[in-house]
Image (cartoon, rainbow, N blue to C red):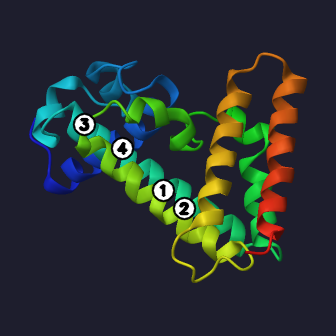
Amino acid sequence: MRVSRAQAEANREAVIDAASRLFREHGFDGIGLKDLMKGAGLTQGGFYKQFESKDDLAAQASRRAMEHATRRWSTAAAASPDPLEAVIGFYLSPGHRETKGEGCPLVALGSDAARQSEEVRQPFQDGIAAHLEILDQLIPGAEGRGDHHKAMAVLSLMVGAVTISRILKDEEMSRRFLSAAAGEVRQIAALRE
């Protein structure tokens, strides 16, 4: 049965959304096209009408995931009288650690993305740049420098802490990594240049 252009576009968006979540849960190579399409409520047959390749879908899903992560940071910051503390609070939390499919794509896919094509890596680079811009706005004294020095340190520390906390089976140690990182982020933000 033929679908309308509007329905085809809705199906395409559903596949990108599902892939964004499923890639973060399983990795780029941990899930096949059949299961990606099933995750969107569709059959595999329409995949190549919507995407050139799995890499094409991975690039679009990665862009969607990074844009979602950036919006999440901006939303948390805008809703708080202490924007940096709001970002630290949600990002370095056990709740974020546990939500792999909706969590940070840098944590879920960072090392996996490094082994992907340039087409798949580009959305990560763009997303990292967007995160650095947000952090520069949130960190006192960092705004306008242009080199993102503090923002790079903070982003690296936060992504690393969540990554390690996800690896650990010891809940207490996992929480300590998140807490230690939060303390260090606050210190970096407070340092004078």
Q: Amino acid at mark 3?
A: Ser
Q: Amino acid at mark 2?
A: His
Q: Are marks 3 and 2 in contact (CB under 8 Å)?
A: no
Q: Amino acid at mark 4?
A: Ala
Q: Secondary structure at mark 3?
A: loop
Q: Can I make out residue 11 in this image?
A: no
Q: Which residue is identified by label 1?
A: 128
Q: Is residue 65 above or below residue 83?
A: above
Q: Are marks 1 and 2 in contact (CB under 8 Å)?
A: yes
- Give the class, few, some or many, for how many residues have Cα within 10 Å of label 4's Cα (few <14, many ≥20): many
Q: Which residue is identified by label 2?
A: 131
Q: Secondary structure at mark 1?
A: helix
Of the numbered discs 1 and 4, the one sitting upstream in the chain is 4
Horizontal and vertical percent position of residue 59: 29, 44
Mark 3–mark 4 distance (CA, rounded to whole Å): 14 Å
Q: Which residue is identified by label 3?
A: 117
Of the numbered discs 3 and 4, the one sitting upstream in the chain is 4
Mark 3–mark 2 distance (CA, rounded to whole Å): 22 Å
Q: Can I make out residue 43 in this image?
A: yes
Q: Amino acid at mark 1?
A: Ile
Q: Is residue 67 above or below residue 115?
A: below
Q: Is residue 35 above or below residue 125?
A: above
Mark 1–mark 4 distance (CA, rounded to whole Å): 15 Å
Of the numbered discs 2 and 4, the one sitting upstream in the chain is 4
Q: Which residue is identified by label 4?
A: 61
In this view, the mark in front (2 or 4)? 2
